[in-house]
Amino acid sequence: SDLETTMGKKNKLEDQIYELKFTSKEFEHLAKRAQKEEKKERMKVKKAIEKGDAESARIFAENAIRKKNEALSYTRLSARLDATASQLQPLLRMGQVSKTMTGLSKSLGKAMKSMDMEKIIGSMESFDSEFRNLGVVAGVVEESMTTTGAGATPVDQVEDLMAQVADEHDIKL
């Protein structure tokens, strides 16, 4: 029945919102962990500088910068997921998604039965538009994770971090 279909879509959207919020919290946790690891790497930089081991200090500085960037990426992704969940929440309450999707499904079904290509294309464009309006998360996740990337750490950032750690602890490089 239509009521079961509408309720099923509502429950599915509720599940998606819950998953978005849960995943957002997981990314917050990963960001905190990366921040702790960054601090550990900074302490390793300090110890290596104190020992006069510039090469190890450079490696630890690269690790610290990578962990800092990782934490920022996790935080950014968490915020985006949370924002998407927040945008979906009012739609769930108003029932717009269920009504819109039900209407689109019916129009697509009619277009498919008539085999009218213009109607099919129009219905598919409506579906595409609706999904874009909902802010599909997959693209956001992919973009955020690729910007996290394991690229090389710029040398100037490494040198700056080593100098900063040395200054903080009154150590000469």
Image (tube, rainbow, N blue to C red):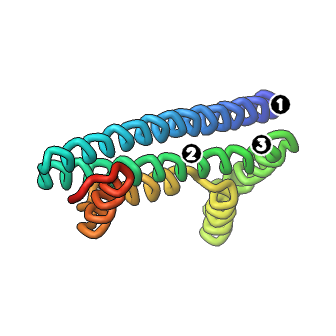
Residue, x 27% and y 53% (percent of image)? 171
Between circles 3 and 2, the one closer to the viewer is 2
Mark 3 near mark 1, Cβ–Cβ under 8 Å?
Answer: no
Q: Earlier in the sequence, mark 3 or mark 1?
A: 1
Residue, x 23% and y 42% (percent of image)? 47
Residue, x 69% and y 37% (percent of image)? 13
Secondary structure found at label 1: helix
Looking at the rendering, which quadrant does residue 121 occupy?
bottom right
Q: Which residue is mark 2?
A: 78
Cα–Cα gap, marks 3 and 1: 20 Å
Q: Which residue is mark 3?
A: 89
Cα–Cα gap, marks 2 and 1: 34 Å
Q: Earlier in the sequence, mark 2 or mark 1?
A: 1
Q: Which residue is mark 1?
A: 3
Q: Indicate the position of residue 93 as horizontal and vertical percent values.
A: 85, 40
Residue count near mark 3 (Cα–Cα under 10 Å), binned few <14, some 14–19, many ≥20:
some
Please, what is the three-letter code of the amino acid marked with disc 3?
A: Gln
Secondary structure found at label 2: helix
Residue count near mark 2 (Cα–Cα under 10 Å), binned few <14, some 14–19, many ≥20:
many
Residue sitting nearer the eye, 33 or 126: 33
Please, what is the three-letter code of the amino acid marked with disc 2?
A: Ser
Between circles 2 and 1, the one closer to the viewer is 2
